[in-house]
Amino acid sequence: MNPRNAFYAQSGGVTAVINASACGVIETARKHRRRIGRVYAGRNGIIGALLEDLIDTGKESPTAIRALRHTPAGAFGSCRYKLKGVDQNRAEYERLIEVFQAHDIGYFFYNGGGDSADTCLKISQLGGQLGYPIIAVHVPKTVDNDLPITDCCPGFGSVAKYIAVSTREATLDVASMAKTSTKVFVLEVMGRHAGWIAAAGGLASDKDLELPIVILFPEVPFDPARFLGRVEECVRKYGYCSVVVSEGVKGADGKFLSDQGLRDAFGHAQLGGVAPVIAALIKQQLKLKYHWAVADYLQRAARHVASKTDAEQAYAVGRAAVELALQGRNAVMPAIVRVSNRPYRWKIGVAELERVANHEKMMPRDFITDDGFGITPKCRAYLAPLIRGEDYPPYQDGLPKYVRLKNAPVKKRLTSGFVLK
Amino acid sequence: MNPRNAFYAQSGGVTAVINASACGVIETARKHRRRIGRVYAGRNGIIGALLEDLIDTGKESPTAIRALRHTPAGAFGSCRYKLKGVDQNRAEYERLIEVFQAHDIGYFFYNGGGDSADTCLKISQLGGQLGYPIIAVHVPKTVDNDLPITDCCPGFGSVAKYIAVSTREATLDVASMAKTSTKVFVLEVMGRHAGWIAAAGGLASDKDLELPIVILFPEVPFDPARFLGRVEECVRKYGYCSVVVSEGVKGADGKFLSDQGLRDAFGHAQLGGVAPVIAALIKQQLKLKYHWAVADYLQRAARHVASKTDAEQAYAVGRAAVELALQGRNAVMPAIVRVSNRPYRWKIGVAELERVANHEKMMPRDFITDDGFGITPKCRAYLAPLIRGEDYPPYQDGLPKYVRLKNAPVKKRLTSGFVLK
């Protein structure tokens, strides 16, 4: 059997370790040259396939591919582009087949979250529906940690570590300042639907270093009076506190607090962020001095403080995806299976994409304390191993030495173009 | 001569390495027990002296004191409290003398920025004016890097490293997303008066990894049209860009952009941050998708990514302060002297406090490019060595193992209290 080529693409919001998965895919494929010919990457995700804008990863040295393991963000470019159903936009699927056929692509690896799992599932069904043989394997990635079946999602552990470390550091800072100045520090973190990332703020405090941290989860409707009561209580007891607030926190009316209608001096709507809203409330109601930060991209790009567990798992799912494809497994996703908590042990299992696509995994209610402001021991036991271990990138002149690939284009074979919808 | 005791206090905004200076002071004093008896720290800075609320650092183990070297923020508490002139509030100085006398304090070490240097100078003059023999040495610290004479200020190098690393990481992130989503990333950094920290964002891009970064300095009046033109140009050329904006950027009217009068839905003034203002401008005028972050305390507390150069200098000024005091040098500050750039070599010199107090060192104009949006090679040559070297704290279970001291109080010897103004 002649080797067939592979297509790999990155999708949705990028992470500190998505390139580690790319590294796992490419290095593993390179070990099976008799089965997998070339690995082509989509430039800017699936758009690269639709536009026949492919990158020949074969032009990259082993050293460059290895450096992906410690380089954050998406080395081939990502995209936010959701394929419609085959019924709704058959042209897109026909185009994909056309491009795959032109480049003899027999393996499709899609590295993303829930939406991408759905795309990958649709591609996996192409074989039957359009008569083109292809094996599609999803490579899990999302800082939101909301994919089902897998115990955790590569990308999440490193964000969680960043938030835990940063919350610890900033809380020590506000503790130092509290006597005469700032008493409350507010940190806004990602997580529009689920509070996994906010929960990681709770790890900043532990038995060796107790710190007063109030968490606002998107799962718990915001109650200003109860929240302010808790902050006041912390400040009375400790002199200070930190608030870790998820961007997805909603009021009792179900609206995002961040969308509460800020206007600038000219009356223009101002895209808020929820941290300043919380900070203003603290100032107005409690008359306490505050500082606030919005971590935004810094949290998900922070490869410099990545979790070793996370980086290893990200690599492992990339490698496993190729191994599954070589076993002929279609429409699956390598999943992380937690074998034990103490010591933490994990292995790679297999999830059927049918069971992954379009299901969000929310925080279990028993991960949040009864008062709604903290994490339970059960949540801590779940989160703790995911941030464990350091995996520093190499540095040069004081800066992490991240790789930029050549990203050489593959010569086009089709004369037809394609217009993105 | 009987040994006399020493007083050490932390003042103003804390940093990732101010405790390294404390470590330098205490470890060095412990080596000279025949000259320096006990080292008392002020709980919450100079307030601890006024209230006779002293901490006996002698109760801390050598291991705990050593751990200060890698622990961020102010281990003894800091304060924002500026002593008035001796003429204006003689009672404060008399109280300090009373407390120092009661505890036989002959050495005063004050760890802070410009205001604190002024306080330290005043204390140094007490000997003559109030007939109490004391040697006062200032230990430089400020993330703002605005102290004169010293080549740089401990605390700055680590913030600069954090901003350079974070800007590099987030810019790789936005580069990945730009094809279909976010094209501009805005990062707000500290520096109300001088653009030293914003300048560090420029280090994110270098010859090995060129990245489009637009810097907004407080030294350059904000010109919306020119700024938007530059962003548009970057996005046209690269597809994306990052903006590093100093919190201190002002409009042509001399007002802070962050004070442009945001109101919430109820008409309450909203303390802004400048990043959302810049982001809104980009959205309204260029119709580009953006993300924004405000680093706030995260930047100055980020011991996890401290600069080794900075940590070493912070320790060295603490040690030198004690050595200067033992040499009988009053009213001085150890200063960092740059001996050469390549290789970077530095040594400790001595600055007279008269020449330090109440002088701010601004960015030289030739550190900013003519267009006002970038750093010159001269600025890069200055900044580069300051972020060099990594100095990781020890980790346990995925989190930095920062020390919390016992901070045991020294028994009060005075019956009188003191009311802070």
Image: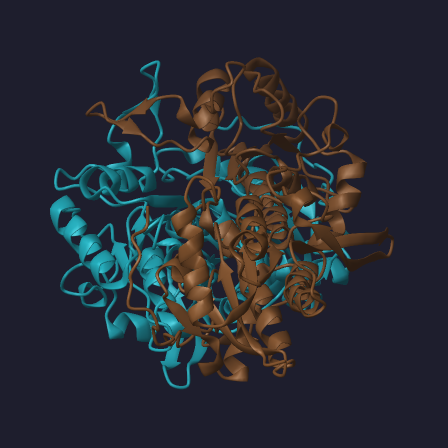
Chain colours: A cyan, B brown
Quarter of the figure with the N terminus of chain A? bottom right
Q: Look at the image and tell me whether residue A171 can be seen.
A: no
Quadrant location of the C terminus of chain A?
A: top left
The foreground one among A386 and A224 is A224
Tell me which residue sits at (14%, 52%) in the image: A229
Q: Nearer the viewer, residue A247 or A15?
A: A247
Q: Residue at x 56, y 28 (%)?
A: A418
Left/right of residue A169 with respect to residue B171 in the rendered view: left
Looking at the rendered structure, the number of numbered marks drawn on it comes to 0
Residue B247 image offset from top left, x and y in percent: 50, 34
For this orientation, the residue located farthest to the front is: B131
Q: Is residue B58 visible?
A: yes
Residue A213 image-quadrant placement = bottom left
Displayed quadrant of residue B347: bottom right
- Does A64 sit above or below residue B315? above
Residue A13 is situated, as x and y percent measured from the top left of the image, at 47, 46
Question: Residue A210 in the image: x percent, y percent?
Answer: 33, 71
Looking at the picture, does residue B137 appear above or below residue A412? below
Could you say where residue A317 lies in the image, as x and y percent from the top left? 51, 66
Write the residue at 42% across / 81% down.
A344
Question: Left or right of B140: which side holds A63?
Answer: right
| Observer-nearest of B371 and A73 | B371
